[in-house]
Every structure is written in structure tokens, then in C-alpha cells.
């Protein structure tokens, strides 16, 4: 056996780290087969058009809604509000650096001025911040937690495999016992309960609320525009994410008042419309790289261990919010 | 013993988690004694004034330099470049969403147009991306790593204590064996080597480079403006952080070309000056909350386990980049 062949044999061993393949995560995504991509139904998309910027350029934000069974009470409210065009004419009234951009009714706290909400919105209880298996609450072992998570449709995928089968991604999260992907979404889970929940990453959309945890209707929404605010997980409902146009929310001038509120109403950014994607005939079709695909597995490996020439030290791990699920316009 | 006294005794036990004190991290910082704050020497600060914004408002960015022994070759170059006013008249020429804003000589890659660098800049080798104890390279146990880190001046502080003495902060990081604070800075360490290094968090400043890892002079700099790009740790040198004015870099329009480069030079943001703080007599004095203080320990505990009324579920942990070291203007 030649020296080169011997090396190849070592590299092919499942326990050995991959050889220097030199493909970047982006190159892996670009080379992935069409069969590894899943169409995003327009039924699960909303379109928010902000007023054009100072140079007259349009500012379109495309929002994907959280799938069942997570946050569905609030997602239902959000669908009703969008169908009613409730946000049209309202504003982005708060932009706090490294935190959130928030939109809705800037005068909502003044009952005399507040815009009336459509009827039929659900008051969602605190218990819905997480999803639990049926049966009494209990503390699960890691194995029991994994068995439950694996029983959810769409979790049999790449992340679990990556972090549990001796591959080269370090599995560590300070906020949860597990992190994983579920039908293209980043989730976390705890053995205590057990329970699972969607996490706050960059571009996640959540439901603002007052102090009582059941007071968020989804009329006031925020997008995370800085380092992932994971401390909000299980305290506020994640209902979606921006899949295109997050820069129109993240590059807005920061509000000078506490919490990033604009003191002068003229500084707010008007919302021309926020409505279901089905009402926007010229909207492109979108697709995401299936988090259960082999391509996603390779993408995650390369993201946790960059081996392209620029990098001299692979990290050995990655946090769930740093592994962005690739989304693109369908050709 | 009354019931209340019994509760107090439990609360005072060092092993027990703190009772629901209901103070937010910000309130703990505001209530901290003056003795827990450390002045930041103006010798370790640079001031970058960008051209005023569209409304004529000034845009000042205050930069704190990384302390010894980390990244000092590049920090020395940075000091020389700032003393020479090398950046004055150059631009912020690249802003990529959820990634970096980068400044320096936009024409630097064209040798005919490149602005000459001052003499005496050091070519810093790849080995300086980390700091190692003296002696041969070896793999350390967790205990040996801790002993070495504890021997560094300024690491005996709150973070180590928090994560290693049974307190209520989960210690988990996918990128390193340890994370801790060193003289007010977030660091990570590996048993392999062993080695320690500064980490890329929001508002960290790093040295851009070409593919060979010793090609960064510090003339081209970037600030992280999104989720912490920890995969850059040990691949690019962290030389400082923005302690005031990061919003002037994070809210700039994103460049439309690949990598966030502005296609039209008119879209770049001019740098009026980037120079040592000693040249700015009206600059406020700054101070940071000592990461070795009892106040920082309380702040970290409250940040990892929010118990103020708004929160219904404490996280139980926090990642090193989500625990921002408080910095304020000195009164």
C-alpha cells in the first residue's frame, strides 16, 4: 500500500476528522443538489414593505412563520393581523443597538389613541412558550429526551447526528441541555419537564409583551438585530424569522431615548404594508436547505471546522445561532 | 428561629442560589460601589470621528485597546498608525450585515494607488493569535489549565468563580474548553497547547488580512456588528473593542456588492480622524466594572438567571459574548 493510499484509508475511517476538503460552507451550499432543498410555502410567508429609504430605494422584509407545534397561538394571531392589514400605516418605533427593532402601534400604550385590534385574537398562556410531550411533567434522562425529540417529525436530521455520533462538532450550549434543528428551525430542549422551544437568534421575530407573560398578542413584534438574545428564550414567543431584508431593520438609526425609542415620531419608519405573501404576486419563491439533508450535515461540519485556505485554526464547534439555515430564491 | 430568619440563613449559604432579589443586571450595575469600577487609561483609547451623518450629527467611535499579553504585535502597529493619523481621510468601505464593518484604505489592494504605510510596522507571526505558558507544548488537564490561567494577573475573578464553584451559571462553550474574563476582557482557553486567546464578540475589533496568517498589519480593521463570529477566534487578531459609538458602525447602510463592499465609492463613510485619545482634550473619562469585583459576580448571576418580574424562566447560563462588561463615562 502506498503512503498516499494509507493516508486515504485513515481519512475514510468514520471516526477520523474529514481531510482538508478546502470547501467553504458557502461552496458546499452552492454545490448541493436540488433534492436537498425544500420549498417554503407562500402560506407561511408574510411581506412587510417599509417606506423607501432616503434615496428612494424600496425596503422589503420577507418573514417566515414558525411551524407547528411551536408558538402557534401567537402565529395564529399574527396571521389574522396580517390578513387584516393591521400594521399598514403603523411604524417601526424602536431600534436599540445590539438588541431589537420593534414595530406596531407606537401609541398602543395610550388606550385613547391605540389602534383597535381585530376581533378573535387568542390570549395565549405562558405554558405555550415551550412544547412538552403528553403525560405528567417529569425530569427526563438525556436518552429519554433524545427519544422524545426524535419522535417529532423533522428532528431526525443533521444536527442530532452531528452532535451525537462522534463527529467533529462540539455539543455545548449554556442555555439548554440540547440544541437541534427541527424542520429548518433552531430549537433547544431541556431534560427538565422535558420541554423544547424555538430559540432567539439574529433575525428571529418575537412577540413583545407587558410584564404578565400572557399579554403578548403579536400586534407588537420585534426582530433581533444583534448577538442572539438567548435569555429571552421561554420568556417571549418566537413566531418567525426574517429570511430576506433583515438589513432594512438592522441598519435603521438607533433611537436615542432609553430602550431605543425614537423621541421624535418623525424618526419612526413607516410600514406601508404587512400582509400575506399570497397577496404579492411578484414575490420570488423561496427554498431552504433541508436540515435533514447530507448537504446540511456537510455545511454544518465545515462551519464548525473551517478548512478552507484562509483559516488556520478550525473551531471544533459552533453555537446553534451561528449556524444559519441557508435560504435562497428558487430559480 | 422565625420562618423569615430561617429563609435568610438558607439564602446566606454559599452553595444555595440567591433568592429572588428581583434586581435586573442593569440595576445591579447602577447600585455598584465606586470601588468596583476601574478607570480606563486614555493611553489605551483611540478616537475615530466619522463624517457627520445625513442630518449633520457627529459620529464618534471610542476604541479600547487589548491589554498585554494578547495581540500586542498588532496593537503596537495600531498605536503607530493612529499616532501617524494614517486613517485620516480614508473610509469605512465595507459593511456586511450580521458580520463586520471594515475600514482602512479601500484602494489598498491596488499597489499603484495604495496609501504608503508608516515605517516600523511589525510582521506578526501566526503563533501570536494565542498566548501559551512558557515551556514545551503539551496537552493540559482541566486543573492544569485552570492553574495556569489563575497565574495570569487579572483572571482570579468573577467568571472563573462563577462557573466553577457550583453557582447557578452553566459553563458551556462550543468553541473552547474554558471561557473567562481577564482584566475586563472576554477570553477563551484550550487544554490543547495549552493556550488562551481573546474572543470575537459584538463590537470587537479585529485585524483584516490576506490568506497568509501573518499578513495583517492592523491598517485594515473591522468591527463585529452581528452575532459573535467566534469561528474567527485564533484565525484573526482581536486588538480592541468599541466602548462607545458602535451604533455608528452597526447602522451604516449595508454594501450591495459581495462581502458588503460598496460598489460606488461615494457610498463609503469618510473617516475624519482616528488618533490617540490624548489628542482629544474634551473626551470623557471612562471606567469599567472590574470583572474581579463582587458587583460583576452579581451582575453575571443576574444576567444568567434573570429574576426581575418581567422574566418567567431564568436561563441558567449565559455565553461569554452575551455578558457585556459594563463601561460608563466617569462622573
Image: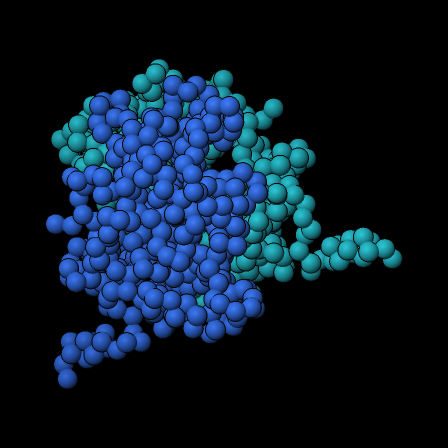
Chain colours: A cyan, B blue
Residue located 54% across and 45% down the image: B213
Residue located 32% across and 60% down the image: B183
Check the image and name the residue furthest to the right: A1
Is B258 on the left-hand or right-hand side of B166?
right
Residue in front for this viewpoint, B276 or A199: B276
Percent position of residue A276, x then y: 42, 26
When asked about the image quadrant of residue A89, the answer is top left
Percent position of residue A235, x then y: 33, 51
How many marks can you see?
Answer: 0
- Give the quarter of the figure containing the N terminus of chain B: bottom left
Is B292 on the left-hand or right-hand side of B178?
left
Question: Does any portion of residue B93 appear in the rendered image?
Answer: yes
Percent position of residue B207, x then y: 44, 42
When asked about the image quadrant of residue B319, the answer is bottom left
When asked about the image quadrant of residue B197, the answer is bottom left
Percent position of residue B277, x then y: 24, 42
Check the image and name the residue furthest to the top: A56
Residue in front for this viewpoint, B96 or B187: B187
Check the image and name the residue furthest to the bottom: B1
- Reply above or below: A24 against A304: above
Residue in front for this viewpoint, A82 or A256: A256
Question: Does any portion of residue B202 appear in the rendered image?
Answer: no
Residue located 52% across and 25% down the image: B110
Residue located 66% across and 56% down the image: A17
Residue in front for this viewpoint, B223 or B84: B84
Amino acid at each position: 500500500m502506498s503512503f498516499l493510499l494509507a493516508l486515504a484509508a485513515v481519512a475514510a475511517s468514520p471516526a477520523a476528522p474529514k481531510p482538508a476538503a478546502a470547501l467553504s460552507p458557502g461552496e458546499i451550499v452552492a454545490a448541493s443538489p436540488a433534492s436537498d432543498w425544500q420549498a417554503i410555502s407562500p402560506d407561511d410567508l408574510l411581506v412587510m414593505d417599509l417606506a423607501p429609504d432616503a434615496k428612494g430605494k424600496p425596503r422589503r422584509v420577507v418573514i417566515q412563520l414558525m411551524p407547528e407545534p411551536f408558538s402557534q397561538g401567537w402565529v395564529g394571531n399574527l396571521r389574522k393581523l396580517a390578513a387584516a392589514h393591521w400594521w399598514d400605516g403603523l411604524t417601526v418605533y424602536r431600534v436599540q443597538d445590539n438588541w431589537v427593532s420593534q414595530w406596531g402601534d407606537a401609541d398602543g400604550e395610550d388606550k385613547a389613541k391605540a389602534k383597535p385590534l381585530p376581533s378573535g385574537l387568542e390570549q395565549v398562556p405562558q405554558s405555550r412558550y415551550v412544547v412538552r410531550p403528553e403525560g405528567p411533567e417529569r425530569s427526563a434522562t438525556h436518552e429519554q429526551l433524545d427519544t422524545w425529540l426524535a419522535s417529532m417529525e423533522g428532528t431526525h436530521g443533521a444536527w442530532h447526528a452531528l452532535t451525537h455520533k462522534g463527529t467533529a462538532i462540539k455539543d455545548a450550549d449554556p442555555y439548554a441541555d440540547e440544541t437541534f434543528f427541527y424542520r429548518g428551525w433552531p430549537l433547544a430542549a431541556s431534560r427538565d419537564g422535558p420541554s423544547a422551544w424555538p430559540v432567539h437568534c439574529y433575525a428571529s421575530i418575537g412577540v413583545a409583551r407587558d410584564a404578565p407573560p400572557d399579554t403578548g398578542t403579536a400586534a407588537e413584534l420585534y426582530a433581533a438585530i444583534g448577538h442572539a438574545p438567548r435569555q429571552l428564550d421561554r420568556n417571549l414567543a418566537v413566531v418567525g424569522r426574517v429570511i430576506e431584508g433583515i438589513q432594512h431593520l438592522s441598519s435603521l438609526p438607533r433611537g436615542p431615548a432609553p430602550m431605543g425609542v425614537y423621541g421624535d415620531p418623525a424618526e419612526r419608519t413607516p410600514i406601508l404594508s404587512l400582509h400575506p405573501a399570497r397577496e404579492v404576486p411578484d414575490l420570488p419563491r423561496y427554498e431552504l436547505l433541508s436540515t435533514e439533508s447530507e448537504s446540511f450535515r456537510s455545511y454544518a461540519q465545515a462551519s464548525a471546522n473551517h478548512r478552507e485556505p484562509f483559516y488556520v485554526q478550525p473551531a471544533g464547534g459552533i453555537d446553534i445561532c451561528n449556524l444559519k439555515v441557508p435560504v435562497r430564491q428558487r430559480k
